[in-house]
Amino acid sequence: MFLNKIVLIFIGLLFFSCSHQNEKPSQKPKELVFHSSKLERKKNAPFSEAVEVGNLLFLAGQVGINPETGKLPEGGIEAETKQTLENIKDVLLTHGSDMKHVIKCTVILSTTDDFAGFNKIFREYFPENKPVRTTFAADLLVGAKIEVDVIAVKVDGFKNTRIN
């Protein structure tokens, strides 16, 4: 009789535990923040420069246009890759992150022939914290040889310490 009571109590506790297991604590939806560009030529673009969701930043694709000259640099894929990654670095710094906190890159090259030159510069910008990456080739706008978009983690208390 005593054993039957213990078994019934155990079954009751198990049932109670299982019935509450699927309950999720109420979660406040993450606020979306859509950031426009600080660059005058991009202020009326039909897309955001970055979108912030919680502690993540999703950046729009960047090409190697120099923000001061409005032109692509001369020097081929290596020069364009460097300028593209500098543009990304600037956007990240503006919104509370940096290259060390990039977790995903999508890279579009105008031709797979440029892969080695691109990769040489990419390694300089990501020597230790290597983000996951997808790379493919496609036609690009404005005559660019490369376009890159990234996802990065925002850093609490991050200060923009960019030295020009």
Image (tube, rainbow, N blue to C red):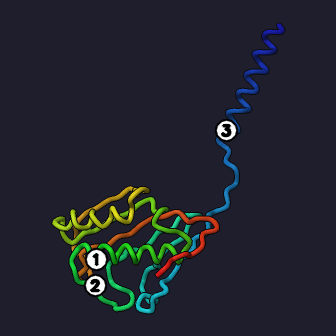
Q: Residue 70: horizontal and vertical position, in percent?
A: 34, 90
Q: Residue 100: horizontal and vertical position, in percent?
A: 47, 62
* Residue drawn at the location 49% of the way across and 79% of the way down: 163
- Farthest residue, direction front: 163
Task: Give left or right: position of 6 versus 92.
Answer: right
Secondary structure state at the residue bearing disc 3:
helix
Residue 116 picture quarter: bottom left
Q: How many marks?
A: 3
Residue 12 picture quarter: top right
In space, the residues marked 3 and 2 are separated at their CA atoms by 56 Å
Q: Which residue is mark 3?
A: 21
* Residue drawn at the location 45% of the way across and 63% of the way down: 102
**Residue 72, which numbered label?**
2
Secondary structure state at the residue bearing disc 1:
helix
Badge 3: residue crowd in 10 Å (few <14, some 14–19, many ≥20): few
Nearer to me, 127 or 138 = 127
Q: Which residue is mark 1?
A: 80
Q: Residue 10: horizontal and vertical position, in percent?
A: 75, 21
* Residue drawn at the location 30% of the way across and 67% of the way down: 121
Q: Amino acid at mark 3?
A: Gln
Badge 1: residue crowd in 10 Å (few <14, some 14–19, many ≥20): many
Nearer to me, 81 or 34 = 81
Cβ atoms under marks 3 and 2 closer than 8 Å: no
Q: Is residue 124 above or below residue 39?
A: above
Cβ atoms under marks 1 and 2 closer than 8 Å: yes
Q: Residue 13: horizontal and vertical position, in percent?
A: 75, 27
Along the polypeptide, which appears first: circle 3 or circle 2?
A: 3
Q: Amino acid at mark 2?
A: Leu
Q: Amino acid at mark 1?
A: Glu
In space, the residues marked 3 and 1 are separated at their CA atoms by 53 Å
Task: Give left or right: position of 139 versus 134.
Answer: left
Along the polypeptide, which appears first: circle 3 or circle 1?
A: 3
